[in-house]
Image (cartoon, helix red, strand yellow):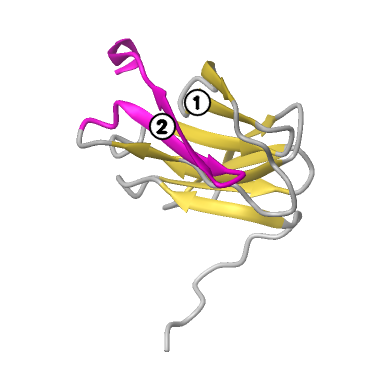
Amino acid sequence: MGCRRRVLRGFRVQDCAITPDGRRLLAADVEEKIHVYNFLTHEEEYCLALKSKPTSVAVSKDSRHMLVNLSEGQIQLIDIDTTDVIRRFQGQKQGSFVIRSTFGGAAENFVVSGSEGKLHFFALSHTFY
């Protein structure tokens, strides 16, 4: 059985992800924010305010970008270092189930998401890498 190393308090977590490089922990709360922590020091680097509640968060293999599903039915591709929203994707419907999206393909050149019995594929421009 594993031992607990650290407890971060102050908000309810909806979803979380650790960047593949092991440097950051991203935590989506239930209050329209993403908290980004330095995973080694446990210090909060920043808190990103969103326009609606995040339901899930995923991180690219290069640890540079996050995909955030929002309760309003939008997916945002966000640069983790700058917090710039690079792209917004629409088409899926957030209902009573949590929709999770992820990067797809060996080069992570598309986003895949599902809703209402359908799979949605969104092409990414190679320019954001």
- Give the mark nearest the N terminus, 2 or 1: 1
Quadrant housing the N terminus:
bottom left
Q: Which residue is mark 1?
A: 77
Q: Position of residue 40 (x, y in %)?
A: 42, 52
Above-or-below relation of 29 to 63: below
Dot 1: within a 10 Å radius of its alpha carbon, few (fewer than 14), some, or many (20 or more) residues? Answer: many
Furthest residue in direction front, as rendered: 117
> What amino acid type is highlighted by mark number 1?
Leu
Q: Residue at x 72, y 29 (%)?
A: 49
Q: Residue at x 76, y 49 (%)?
A: 30
In the image, farthest residue toward the bottom: 1
Q: Is residue 123 above or below residue 29?
A: above
* Residue 34 position in % (x across, y down): 64, 39
For residue 76, which quarter of the picture? top right
Foreground pick, 88 / 65: 88
Relative to 121, is 116 above or below?
below
Q: Secondary structure at mark 1?
A: strand
The relative height of residue 75 versus residue 124 in the rendered view (above or below) is below
Tell me which amino acid carries mark 2: Val
Q: Find out whether the residues at labels 2 and 1 contact each other: C-beta distance under 8 Å.
A: yes
Q: How many marks?
A: 2
Which span is picked out in magenta? 107-129
- Expressed as whole percent of the image width and height from the top left, the position of residue 45 reads 56, 37
Can you say which quadrant of the picture contains the C terminus?
top left
Is label 2 in a helix, a strand or a loop? strand
Q: Which residue is mark 2?
A: 111
Q: Nearer the viewer, residue 50 or 112?
A: 112
Q: Quadrant of residue 97?
A: bottom right
Q: Residue furthest top?
A: 127
